[in-house]
Image (tube, helix red, strand yellow):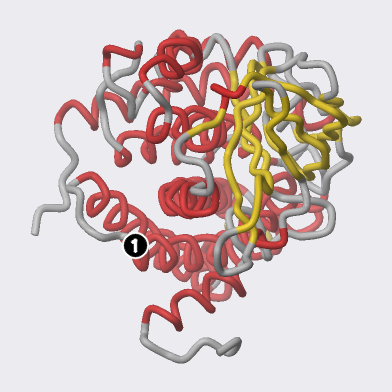
Amino acid sequence: MDFDLTEEQESFRRTVREFAEEVVRPRAVEFDRTGEFPLDIVRRMGELGLFGIPFPEEWDGQGADLTTLCLAIEELGRVDSSVAITLEAGVGLGAMPIFLFGTQEQKRRWLPPLCRGEALGAFGLTEPGGGSDAGATRTTARLEGGEWVIDGSKAFITNSGTAITSLVIVTAVTGERPDGRKEISAIVVPAGTPGLTVGPSYRKLGWHASDTHELTFSNCRVPEDHLLGERGKGFSQFLRILDGGRVAIAALAVGLTQGCLDESVSYARERTAFGRPIGAFQALQFKLADMRVAVETARLATYRAAWLRDRGRPFTAEALIAKLHASEVAVAAAREAVQVHGGSGYIDDVPVARFYRDAKILEIGEGTSEIQRLLIARDLGLPDARS
């Protein structure tokens, strides 16, 4: 077994870490406080080629793999989760569906600007009345005069209202299947289409600088050729997208956990109590040792899942395991990091306070921890409670 990254990947990791430390870190507190979307930083990420990492060069991508994308997300996540999730969602939810399921014409039309980071795409799946139960989609789309007419709403949609958002991919009920279940399809809706309304930005617990909105569709019309992939395949498409997305979210969680460890070790060396650095006390040493174990095991699970996907091997169960473990590790590490910092950790401008607020969503987005456990149990061959 070879756990080494390639020389190219190590060089790339160093480049992204330098960018995170020199460009992102100095402004992370400011963006967290104001909730401003870091547009200039996102554009510089585009210039670095980060949004095109897993896509072929013919679409202005970098021709790399999921492992390389995870490296970038982890390094950004060490410093700021809002920037990291902007990259993860822009690649995994905005551009990847077009690359995997789009026609050649759709790819030519929409993919290159997304790969260059000149534009961002969003994925409209979650609805106000249904989160984990994605099959309960109520948004509808009907064909009328060569156009899809979309009505409904979506909630918690990342990258959906920025100055460079170019499109939203929407799942909608387009009919009924022979077995009576809903026929769900995916449709591309360009930003600015009449009938698409972007709601106010949410006031969130964390990820303050990440762009998140509710979307409303009212008699929203797009050409028939904006159907993404086969009609009725929207649900299976989104499941495939979530597999890769879970690995990427796990990488973000690994980055946040590493950030918690880095900040805590630094503080434990500098802060003194009773005439000694607090890192000399066994109670603190045990916390930091446990944090180290947690981040290393989460990293192994995450990169094994990415490795399997990059080699075209089944990785769904491994993605579930990585996402579940890494997200829960991140929440625990953030809690302990605040404890290590004591009163200082409760001050918003201290990184671990931001990490603490940012961590919780990792147990919710891209499938809650409960859903991960349910799907892992099914992979074990346990019976479905609905049957």
**Picture coordinates of residue 362 (x, y %)?**
62, 55
In the image, taking residue 128 as reference, residue 62 lies left or right, namely left
Name the foreground residue: 239 vs 40: 239
The secondary element bearing badge 1 is classed as helix
Report whether residue 261 is seen. Answer: no
User: Which picture quadrant has residue 1?
Assistant: bottom left
Question: How many C-alpha atoms fall within 10 Å of the one at disc 1: few (<14), some, or many (≥20)?
Answer: many
Name the foreground residue: 194 vs 120: 194
Residue 135's place in the image compared with 347, above or below, is below
**Picture coordinates of residue 304 (x, y %)?**
27, 57
Name the foreground residue: 170 vs 86: 170
The residue drawn where x is 84% and y is 52% is 128
User: Which picture quadrant has residue 31?
Assistant: top right
Q: Residue furthest left?
A: 1
Residue at which label 1 appears: 301
The residue drawn where x is 68% and y is 32% is 143
Report whether residue 90 is seen. Answer: yes
Residue 164's place in the image compared with 347, above or below, is above
**Picture coordinates of residue 193 (x, y %)?**
76, 16
The residue drawn where x is 38% and y is 35% is 100
Residue 50's place in the image compared with 71, above or below, is above
In the image, taking residue 46 as reference, residue 273 lies left or right, namely right
In the image, taking residue 64 as reference, residue 212 lies left or right, namely right
Amino acid identity at mark 1: Ala
